[in-house]
Amino acid sequence: MQKIEIITDDNRDYKELPVVPVVIYEELCKNFDIDSILTMSTLKNNDERIGYIRGVRDVLNRVFILTKHTEKE
């Protein structure tokens, strides 16, 4: 599994980041798991599936970072 790292501006005040409850992250993971993406009929070929999976993983990783940030406070 490829690790995705999101680089943010170091000068940004982290108190301005939105708060995302862990339950939202967990629900998104359930609804957008690999099996459900692979069976989506709107995706026409494997290139679209891979692109969609990458996009979903990027979003889920960002939401996870925001939930992790709120747990530290």
Image (cartoon, rainbow, N blue to C red):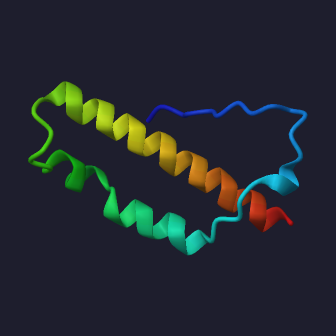
Q: Which residue lies most toward the front here?
A: 16
The answer to whether 23 appears left or right of 36 in the picture is right
Q: How many marks?
A: 0
Residue 44 placement (x, y as % from top left): 10, 33
Please tell me in which quadrant of the rendered image residue 30 appears: bottom left
Viewport quadrant of the N terminus: top left
Viewport quadrant of the C terminus: bottom right
Q: Residue at x 52, y 64 (%)?
A: 25
- Which is more toward the observer, 50 or 16? 16
Residue 67 placement (x, y as % from top left): 67, 61
The answer to whether 61 appears left or right of 18 in the picture is left
Please tell me whether residue 46 is drawn above or below residue 32 in the rendered image.
above
Residue 70 placement (x, y as % from top left): 76, 64
- Which is more toward the observer, 72 or 51? 51
Residue 12 placement (x, y as % from top left): 86, 39
Q: Residue at x 40, y 45 (%)?
A: 56
Q: Residue at x 16, y 29 (%)?
A: 46
Q: Residue at x 40, y 38 (%)?
A: 55
